[in-house]
Amino acid sequence: MESLFSQSVKLLSEGTNTSLRGLSVVNEKIMWVSGSSGMVARSTDGGLTFKWTKVKNYEGRDFRDIEGFDSNTAIIMAVSEPALILKTYDGGLSWKQVFVDSTPGMFLDAMDFDGGKGVVVGDPIDGKVFLAETTDRGDSWQIINKSECSLMKPGEAFFASSGSNISFMNKSAKYFYVSGGMHSRIFFEDNCIALPLQMGKNSTGANAMDISPSGKKGIVVGGNFSNDKLVDSTSVQFSIGKNLLLSRPQHALHGYRSSVAYITEKDLIACGTSGVDFSSDGGLNWNLISSKSFHVAKKSKYDNAVYLAGTNGTVAKLILND
């Protein structure tokens, strides 16, 4: 276990042949992870043990996002060829197909849920953002059309790096999502605002975002995944009001970050291939607490437990030391 500052990262599992980008933490005991090679895992004891499975008939798929509702019920998302969403009601023993789309160019990037409400975002089809919504925990999905902000700019798309580039406002049907590539923007209802992040290359821009517990502010992280130690313009904060007000951190993240999560209104964690950062002042200043690579970090829905996941089946827990 690495121990720097007053936080540490405790390794729970490593060595399974899968790259994990999907992570959902129901509570301190129950978590789900998903990744490449058709792999899904569930823990019901806080990461002491994991039950690893290859989803039958989908062994070659890359499940880039997962949403766990409880120890038995979860949804996984396969990005393309065709784009799929599967659901289990029996702890992963069997999976039911609840969404499929074989449209050429279809590529799903991330999901988010608030109770029974859910949304999935995908790369542009015919130049427009792909969005689909559910109101029944993903049992059924409806493709929706958005405003003129759904028109994407040349070279603009979304990253399926951690299932984190779309986020509901707490207890609201409204959600934000962020794009990257040649252009990087934040989208909210009828607004689409350019972000002061690295952009101009296919590997640059926003990768992930989160909304604070109060619903009054948020944060976006990204950078350049092909130059993951470049620290310039890797995060931006925003306040939520009549207009979104953007601000930069005082002390930047230590490179490209593919995932970010609020733990409390002031405590945040961000991770990427070049390490893990922690902020105790709302994202103004960041400390590097681990140099280990992770793709995704998520906080529990019902307590402050935080877990991380990455390549080689790596799963870890954030330890907040006294």
Image: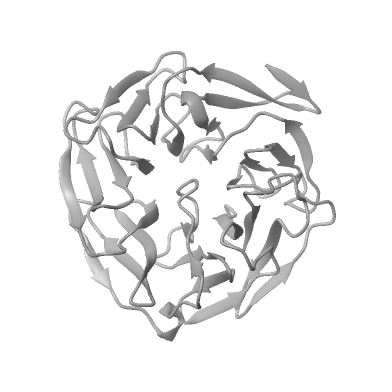
Q: How many marks?
A: 0
Quarter-wise, where is residue 209 in the image?
Answer: bottom right
Residue in front for this viewpoint, 199 or 118:
199
Hey, which residue is sitting farthest top in the picture?
A: 48
Q: Quadrant of the C terminus?
A: top right
Residue in front for this viewpoint, 122 or 115:
122
Residue 321: % across, % down: 73, 23
Hey, which residue is sitting farthest right in the picture?
A: 250
Hey, which residue is sitting farthest bottom in the picture?
A: 148
User: Vertically, is 10 above or below 159?
Assistant: above
Residue in front for this viewpoint, 124 or 43:
124
Residue 120: % across, % down: 35, 58
User: Vertically, is 13 above or below 154?
Assistant: above
Colour mode of the rendering:
one colour
Q: Quadrant of the N terminus?
A: top right
| Left or right: 312 as drawn, with respect to 123 | right
Quarter-wise, where is residue 143 in the image?
Answer: bottom left
Residue 292: % across, % down: 66, 28
Residue 76: % across, % down: 30, 42
| Left or right: 13 as drawn, with respect to 86 | right
Residue 303 in view: yes
Residue shown at 57%/25% (left/top)?
Answer: 317
User: Vertically, is 297 above or below 250?
Assistant: above
Residue shown at 39%/83% (left/top)?
Answer: 147
Residue 322 in view: no
Residue shown at 33%/30% (left/top)?
Answer: 40
Residue shown at 28%/42% (left/top)?
Answer: 75
